[in-house]
Image: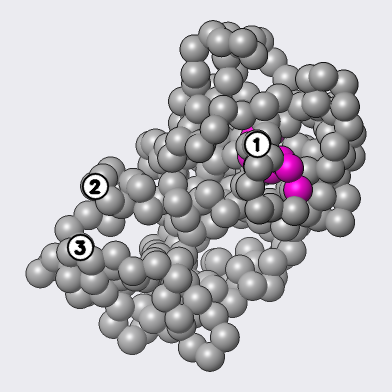
Amino acid sequence: MDFATPLIPARLQRRYKRFLADVILPDGSEVIVHCPNPGSMLGLAGPGTICWLSDHRGGNRKLPFGWEIAELPGPAADLSRRLVGINTGHANAIVAEALAAGRIDSLAGYRETRREVKVGARSRLDFQLLGGPPSGPESCFVEVKSVTLSRVTGLAEFPDARTERGARHLLELAELAAAGHRAVLLFLVQRADCDSVRCAADIDPAYAATLQQVAGRVEIRAYRCDFALNGIGPRGTTPRGITLAAEIPVTGLIRP
């Protein structure tokens, strides 16, 4: 998934009301930007953090910029491994692109992909894959969770805040599995510096318990992302896009 326009670096002043942030642009001006992440963004939203912004000026959005990527401190040569995609809305687009290109081997062999599929009276799941291979169920439901948290080097964690909605999705996936469908929870780690994922049980014990409860019925998979970079330009090296990369293990689960 490539960004529509080149991203602009800024420095974070503060994040507040979940979806707003004050940043300083390269010209020294201070602006309010949209922060498209409802989680805590633990470790990613401290004052001084470098934010990479999409430019919405000239469009019909209320705020002129949107926060897309947080940059962690580190050696300049390792920029692609210091970037974290914080826009949870991009997770489905990244997975959809990979599905269309046939780059998710574990979800290959389906003829049709539907998005935002209604399940029950008040929920939707991200994808339904139809026309599956003869060896398995004809239908596969997939729920994608964007992962940004890492408190231990190389280890991603989910969630970064309590999520009753996330636990409900797990139970819905388990119900679909019991009805004969294939059901998959896909953790999309929007960072390139992690090689495994675990549940952050200390942050949300209820979610951790529900994840353990459904682990024998729901497939739990994880993929990390890679970041494409533009070459040296007026602003130096800048992020160009985010793509789904390698599958990585989910640790800490005891499967029946």
Amino acid type for the residue under numbered disc 1? Asp
When the figure is inspected, residue 58 is found, relative to residue 83, above or below; the finding is below
**Disc on the earlier residue, 1 or 3:** 1
On the rendered structure, is 193 left or right of 107?
right
On the rendered structure, is 28 left or right of 256?
right
**Disc on the earlier residue, 1 or 2:** 1
On the rendered structure, is 39 left or right of 192?
right
Q: Nearer the viewer, mark 1 or mark 3?
A: 1
- What residue lies at 46% left-to-right and 83% top-to-bottom? 119
Q: Nearer the viewer, residue 46 or 135?
A: 46
Label 1: state its secondary structure. strand
Instruction: Name the residue carrying label 3.
Output: 110
- What residue lies at 37% left-to-right and 53% top-to-bottom? 96
Label 3: state its secondary structure. loop
Amino acid type for the residue under numbered disc 2? Gly
Image location of residue 144, percent across then percent down: 48, 59
Instruction: Name the residue carrying label 2.
Output: 102
**Disc on the earlier residue, 2 or 3:** 2
Asked if marks 1 and 3 touch (Cβ < 8 Å), the reply is no
Q: Quadrant of the C terminus?
A: bottom left
Instruction: Name the residue carrying label 1.
Output: 55
The extreme bottom residue here reads: 121
Label 2: state its secondary structure. loop
User: Which residues are drawn in magenta?
Assistant: 63-71
